[in-house]
Amino acid sequence: MKLIFSVMFISLIGASMVIFGSCAESPSLQSQDSPTAIINVSGMICGGCSKRIEGTLLKLAGVNTVKADHIHKNIRINFDESKVSLDKIKQEIIKMGFGII
Ligand SMILES: [Cu+2]
């Protein structure tokens, strides 16, 4: 009986993580003040590339959300202009080996 409860509890945590995970990407949660930029990038050829870009850019202070799309070859990024500049973000993308179109 105890096992059943712990299994239920773990799956409940899993479900809430999925819910909160999808909320984090929702544009409605973004601050109205911070701009969202769309950067066209060359060299992204698969989901691994986009995940790598997302992971690296999210580590930058001031970057709120990053959505890299390797099919449309662009990155949608929401950031705090007082903490990070668009130039700095582009530099990081170039440092990873991608090109800015
Ligand atoms: Cu790739």
Image (cartoon, grey):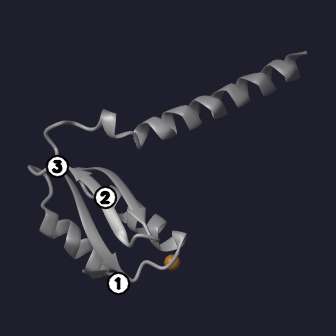
> Which residue matches tag 3?
35
Amino acid type, callout 2: Arg
Question: Which x, y percent locates residue 98?
Answer: 34, 81
Residue at image x 68%, y 25%?
A: 12
Task: Please give the name of the residue rendered at 33% of the width and 40% of the height, measured from the top-left corner.
Answer: 27
The x, y position of residue 7, in whole percent, is 80, 27
Q: Viewed as shown, does residue 80 lie left or right of 52?
A: left
Q: Which residue is mark 2?
A: 76
Q: Along the polypeptide, which appears first: circle 2 or circle 3?
A: 3
C-alpha distance separating marks 2 and 3: 10 Å
Left or right of 86 on screen, residue 100:
right
Q: Quadrant of the C terminus?
A: bottom left
What is the residue that sits farthest to the top in this orientation? 1
Chain-order first, disc 2 or disc 1: 2
Residue 94, position in %: x, y?
27, 80
| Residue that badge 1 annotates | 97
Q: Is residue 59 visible?
A: no
- Mark 2 vs mark 1, foreground winner is 2
**Amino acid type at image mark 1:** Gly
